[in-house]
Image (spheres, grey):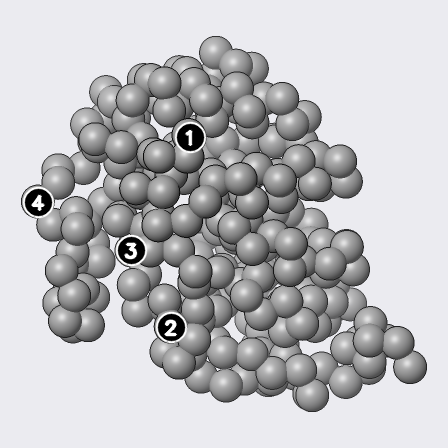
Amino acid sequence: MSAALALAAAPDTVSGAVHSWDVSTNVDGPGTRFVAFLAGCPLRCLYCHNPDTWSRRSGTPTTAEDLLARIDRYRRFIDVAGGGVTLSGGEPLLQPAFVEAVLRGCRERGLHTALDTAGSVGHLASDALLDQVDLVLLDIKSWGSPSYAELTGGRLAPTLAFARRLAARGQRTWLRFVVVPGHTDRDDVVEGVAGFAASLGCVERVDVLPMHRLATAKYEALGLDDPMADVEPPSPETVAHVREIFTSHGLHAV
C-alpha cells in the first residue's frame, strides 16, 4: 500500500501535536471556520501573537481521526455558515503527514479547507498535501533578506520559492501582511511584497493586518519579554496607506 493510501485508510494512525482550536468568522478564510492551531514553529517573529505555540511540546498528541471527530461536531454549523476548516499554528507544515490526513478527511466530508502558513518550510508540503487544500493563506512577513531576518529570525527565500510553487500549481491564495511599525510600514518593504504578489497571478486577496499587542499576557505567562510591548500599533492612516500600495499593483486589498 502506498503512503498516500495508507494515510487515507487509517487517519487513526497519523498523529500530530494540536495546541488549541477555535471557531471564527471571516478571519481565517471565508465564512465561519473551525480553526486548529498546531504546535511548533521555526520562526520567532517579533510581533508573534502566539508564542505559546512555538514549541511542539506545547501541543496535545492527537490523531487525525480524533481531530476530525471534533470537527464533525461543528460540521452542520460550518456547512450552514458557508465556512470550512483552517489549519494554522504555529507552522502547520512542520507536521505534513498529520496536515494531509486531516485535510483529506475534511475534503471527504465536503468541507472547504484552508492552510495558514508562512511558507518557510514549504518544501515539506508534498503535491498530495497541497491537492487537499482549497485555499492557502500565505503570510509574507517582510521584504529583503536583512529586514525579513531581523523581523522573523528566518530566511525569506524559502517563502518566495513556496509562493512561486503555488503560482505554478494555480493554487488559490490569499496573502497576509502584518503592518509592524518600524519594520513593515516602510514603502520599500510594502512595494517589494506587493510587486512580488502581483507577479504570481494566484493571489486573490491581500489581508492587510495591523500589529496588535494582545499577546502581552502570553509572554508574561511564559516568562518572556514581549519585543513589541512598547510599540504602538500602526495608525488607521498607515494601514490604509499600505492597502493603497497593494491596490496600486492591481491586488484586492482588504
Residue indicated by mark 4? 230
Looking at the image, tell me whether mark 2 or mark 3 is earlier in sequence order. Answer: 3
Instruction: Tell me the distance, in whole angstroms, between the alpha carbons under discs 4 and 1.
Output: 23 Å
- The answer to which quarter of the image holds residue 76 is bottom right
Q: Please name the amino acid that badge 1 sits on.
A: Trp
Question: Mark 4: which secondary structure?
Answer: loop
Task: Give the class, few, some or many, for how many residues have Cα within 10 Å of label 4's Cα (few <14, many ≥20).
Answer: few
Looking at the image, tell me whether mark 4 or mark 2 is earlier in sequence order. Answer: 2
**Residue 59: % across, % down:** 42, 79
Residue indicated by mark 3? 49
Q: Is residue 248 above or below residue 76?
A: above
Q: Please name the amino acid that badge 4 sits on.
A: Asp
Instruction: Tell me the distance, in whole angstroms, between the alpha carbons under discs 1 and 2.
Output: 26 Å
Q: Is residue 61 above or below residue 183?
A: below
Residue indicated by mark 2? 55
| Residue occupying the point 53% across, 39% down | 157
| Residue occupying the point 91% across, 81% down | 1
| Residue occupying the point 48% across, 40% down | 156
Instruction: Tell me the distance, in whole angstroms, between the alpha carbons under discs 3 and 4.
Output: 15 Å
Question: Mark 3: which secondary structure?
Answer: loop
Instruction: Tell me the distance, in whole angstroms, between the alpha carbons under discs 1 and 3.
Output: 20 Å
Q: Residue furthest left?
A: 230
Which of these two is toward me, 205 or 53? Answer: 53
Residue indicated by mark 1? 143
Q: Residue furthest front?
A: 146
Task: Give the class, few, some or many, for how many residues have Cα within 10 Å of label 3's Cα (few <14, many ≥20).
Answer: some
Question: Is any atom of residue 106 visible in this view?
Answer: no
